[in-house]
Image (cartoon, rainbow, N blue to C red):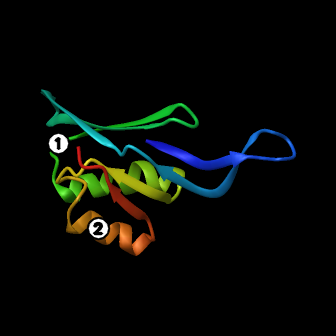
Amino acid sequence: MFSLYAEKSAKTGMFEPTSSRLRVRDGPLICGEFPSSNGYKLIFTAICPFYKFGVVAPIRNKEAATVARIIVEKIILKFGLPFEVLSDGGKEFCNEVSDELYRMLGIKKTENNC
């Protein structure tokens, strides 16, 4: 999930962003397997609890390179760099490819082992 790191302003009493970077919480998810459509049988999903919007993309497999490409194309290039990514520890999100991507871009990665 995506949300801006925000806190209440003492002046206005309204929530204001303290950083221009997105904070990904409770991580992106892979849903499926669904009946294949043009080779796509899984769905990458992520939801922003702060703005109440979702990111959805069809994917053909859960390979590390596929998931990293979707994170770059559908999240980073459209919304900017996340401040933090929280993952459930799934292999598609916890691997050398994503670790290197997060390291190069300065994204903090945490795991929530369920």
Q: Which residue is mark 2?
A: 99
Identity, as a three-letter code, of the amino acid under mark 2:
Asp
Residue 56 x/y as whole percent: 36, 36
- Position of residue 76 relative to residue 31, above or below, is below
Q: Which residue is mark 1?
A: 60
- The structure residue drawn at horizontal position 23% and vertical position 52%, both measured from the top left corner, is 89
Q: Quadrant of residue 8?
A: top right
Q: Image quadrant for the C terminus?
A: top left
- The structure residue drawn at horizontal position 87% and vertical position 46%, both measured from the top left corner, is 11
Mark number for residue 75?
none
Residue 29 x/y as whole percent: 29, 40
From the viewer's perspective, is 109 left or right of 66? right
Helix or strand or loop: what does disc 2 sit on?
Answer: helix
Helix or strand or loop: what does disc 1 sit on?
Answer: loop
Residue 3 x/y as whole percent: 54, 44
Q: Image quadrant for the N terminus?
A: top left
Residue 41 x/y as whole percent: 16, 33
Q: Name which of mark 2 and mark 1 comes first in the sequence.
A: 1
Residue farthest to the top, as pictured:
35
Identity, as a three-letter code, of the amino acid under mark 1:
Arg
- Position of residue 15 relative to residue 87, above or below, is above
From the viewer's perspective, is 57 left or right of 4? left
From the viewer's perspective, is 111 left or right of 106? left
Q: Which residue is nearer to you in this view: 100 or 37?
A: 100
Q: Quadrant of residue 30?
A: top left
- Position of residue 23 relative to residue 26, above or below, is below
Residue farthest to the right, as pictured:
11
User: How dense is the environment of label 2, judged by Cα within 10 Å: few (below 14), some, or many (20 and up)?
Assistant: some
